[in-house]
Amino acid sequence: MPRHTANLLLLLSGAIWGMGFVAQSTAMEAIGPLLFIGLRFLVATLFLLPFAWFEHRRATAPVTRGNRIGFLQIGLVLFSGMVLQQYGLLYTTVTNSGFLTGLYVVMVPILTLLVLRTRPHPLVWPAVIMTFIGIFLLSGARVTTLNRGDALTLGCALFWATQVILVGRYSVASGRPLALSLVQFSVCAVLGLGAAVMFEPIALPAIRAALPEILFAGIFASGIAFTLQVVGQRYTTAPQAAIFLSTESIFAALFGALLLGEFVPAIGYLGGLLIFLSILLVEVGPVIAARRRLATGRGL
């Protein structure tokens, strides 16, 4: 798959996740965070199961034990991030949640450098700075005391950064993106439903009331968007993927304004422009740099 096609898949993931923030927020008017997570990923698991089975039938080799362990680790990290994000939405706005979650775009290249000892492309660093400023402007460029929901969402961003890095590693190593997605969805479904049984009330009328949000989050924001992320990350680096996925903050603000009546300040549109410029930088910049090197070489 060409890199630009993979990046388009990541961009689409960000757009779907941005809309998913609305579903995550409104669903909790009827059911608890843990039950929503469990049901959401149960739907995602059932949705992806036939596609993963088809991938399994066509595979030339089984998934190794190391990759299976990696898949489980990704599921645990995803569940931890989802719990923090979902509880955070009880106390903060969709726009703030999108902004703070988007901070993983800064964390990914730093963790890649410090933990994996892998240097990102030089153009990633200015793109990350532009993205961070863009997300900050999108939130209204206000620095205030963090409330409980904002603090939880900051923790979520760290787990999100870890998930992006792990997906980049195991999606390439295993060559089985659908199997990876299926395992991470299954882990989240089992842990979410198990925790909900222990800590939250479960009532069928409440589940019916939240069913549209559960189905959207399960099929689109999980089953499709997370799988697009896994497939796309096979053909690009984790820091570059994080920049494309960070567009979820733009779409979270957009859909929060359109569907929930949340306010997007005028300066927020400048922030959105900066994020898209950072995407353009990491997408087109390496191509231009390579052509310049080639032209310089020919001149010699």
Image (cartoon, rainbow, N blue to C red):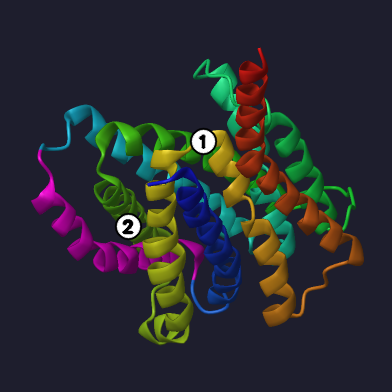
Residue 31 in the image: above or below residue 147: below
Using the image, tell me which numbered label, if any, was put on residue 238.
Answer: 1
Query: Can you say whether 106 is above or below 99 in the image?
Result: above
The front one of 139 and 234 is 234
Where residue 124 appears, as percent x and y from the top left, is 66, 32
Q: Which residues are magenta?
A: 32-60
Observer able to see residue 133: yes
The answer to whether residue 224 is above or below residue 120 is: below
Q: Which mark, by number, is residue 194? A: 2
**Residue located 26% across and 35% down the image:** 174
- Residue name at image x 34 percent, y 39 percent: 171
Tell whether position 100 is magenta: no
- Let me know if residue 93 appears in the view: no
- Label 2, residues with CA under 10 Å away: few <14, some 14-19, many ≥20: some
| Residue situated in front as seen by the camera: 258 or 291 | 291
| Quadrant of the rendered image containing residue 264 | bottom right
Secondary element at image label 2: helix
Q: Which of 50/94 is in front?
A: 50
- Residue 34 belongs to the span the image colors magenta: yes
Task: Tell me how many marks there are.
Answer: 2
Tell me which residue sits at (67%, 27%) in the image.
292
- Element carrying mark 1: helix
For this view, does 280 lie left or right of residue 210?
right
Q: Amino acid at mark 2?
A: Gly
Mark 1 or mark 2, earlier in chain: 2
Q: Is residue 216 left or right of residue 173?
A: right
